[in-house]
Amino acid sequence: MDSYEQLLDKLKQQVPDKTSSGERFVLPQAELFIQGSKTIIRNFDAICQKLRRDPNDLMKYLFKELATPGVLNGTQLVLQAKVNARLVNEKISDYFNGRVVCKECGRPDTDLKTIDGVTTVVCQACGAKRPASR
Ligand SMILES: [Zn+2]
């Protein structure tokens, strides 16, 4: 029978190695605070800069995904509802996977361009293109 340590080792071996898919890039975490019935993402502008995306693009994505309207207020994003930090960070992670990271080389250094009417992720590192998910 396996000891507890041996079981742990087996579990670790089953975890896929993610280093080749660009996950070394550390996603910025949203810093939230609740004000009355609103949620404010304090570092929204910093997140957009790190992801090299127009704040309007990420803003619209979050409004849709969180089913919550809101408004940009300087460098902060104000959501008109109380939203859980874990959920917001999940959505930012989905956004990163769908509209930022290059699926070919796994790097986050990409641009969002409209090519033939299709919003496309264009990688600056390897030149790969793919349609952005919505
Ligand atoms: Zn690439």
Image (tube, rainbow, N blue to C red):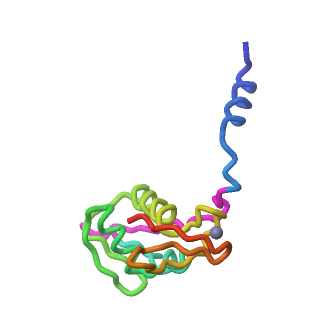
Q: Position of residue 102 (x, y in %)?
A: 59, 66
Rendered image quadrant of residue 11: top right
Q: Residue furthest front?
A: 116
Residue 37 is covered by the magenta coloring:
yes
Task: Give me the residue at 66% from left, 40% from top.
Answer: 15
Rendered image quadrant of residue 42: bottom left
- Name the image quarter holding the N terminus: top right
Q: Position of residue 32 (x, y in %)?
A: 41, 67
Task: Give me the residue at 71% from left, 29% from top.
Answer: 10
Task: Give me the residue at 55% from left, 75% from top.
Answer: 122
Task: Give me the residue at 67% from left, 72% from top.
Answer: 126
**Range shown magenta:** 21-39
Q: Position of residue 13 (x, y in %)?
A: 72, 35
Judging depth in this view, the residue of 124 and 57 nearest the camera is 124
- Name the image quarter holding the C terminus: bottom left
Q: Residue furthest top?
A: 1
Judging depth in this view, the residue of 88 and 98 nearest the camera is 98
Residue 98 is covered by the magenta coloring:
no
Magenta: predominant secondary structure element?
loop
Rendered image quadrant of residue 75: bottom left
Quadrant of ligand 1: it is bottom right
